[in-house]
Amino acid sequence: MIKLCYDVKEYRRQILDSAINGDSIVELGCHVGNTTRVLLESFRDSRIIAIDNSPEAEEKMKELACENMEFINADVRLHETLLEVYRKIPKCDILAIDLGGGYHPDTVFKVFYIWSSTFKPKHTIIRNRGILEFVNSSETSEEDYKSEKGYLDSYHDSGIPPQIKEFGLWTPSLK
């Protein structure tokens, strides 16, 4: 199942409700590890791979270091990061994505699409206001496209995608 939310407490609740002890969890956008800490306390037998490229993350994540959690200081938009994680864990049960909270829904969706189609999680939980606002503001047609898994069925057999060149085209400001 794919779940969307914006409130960080709701995001953590949805992860806790979806995961079971022993699941493999990939957390994209762990920042300083507040959600990671909750996962470690709740799922002592789970393998957790937490990824973030923010400068604040590395020191804080070292404090959480343990045998069932690995932190990778990298950009989740890069093919090399996807490949590194895939070599460690070619499938995950829970994919948790919290990239920027409310910003860049297009980037968040691309990251979701690539990572979920590669790892085929049972559940994906996405925290992003833009995507949630879009879904809640949309009317749908009579067409019935729905995936019951944590990834979209339309992309499920494509393997690890090549590097996406358009990630390098974005700019934070036009000024």
Image: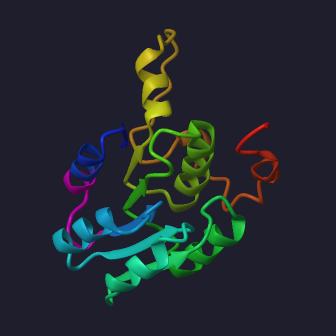
Q: Position of residue 76 (x, y in %)?
A: 60, 62
Residue 16 relative to residue 101: left or right: left
Compared across the picture, whether 92 is left or right of 112 comes to left
Residue 74 in percent (x, y) is at 60, 71
Foreground residue among 79 and 12: 12
Q: What residue lies at 33% left-to-right and 84% top-to-bottom?
A: 63
Residue that appears at 24% across and 74% down:
40
Q: Residue at left 54%, top 71%? A: 55
Which residue appears farthest toward the bottom when viewing the image?
67
Where residue 78 appears, as percent x and y from the top left, is: 69, 63
Left or right: 91, with 37 as reference point:
right
Please check the rendered image and state whether residue 16 is part of the magenta-colored stretch, yes or no: yes
Instruction: Say whether residue 108 is magenta.
Output: no
The stretch of residues the image draws in magenta is 15-23
* Nearer to me, 17 or 57: 57
Residues 30 and 156: in front is 30
Q: Is residue 62 left or right of residue 116?
A: left
Location of the N terminus by quadrant is top left
> Relative to residue 130, is residue 14 depicted above or below?
below
In the rendered image, the quadrant that contains the C terminus is: top right
Residue at x 18%, y 73% (from the top left corner): 41
Coordinates of residue 34 in the picture (x, y in percent): 30, 64
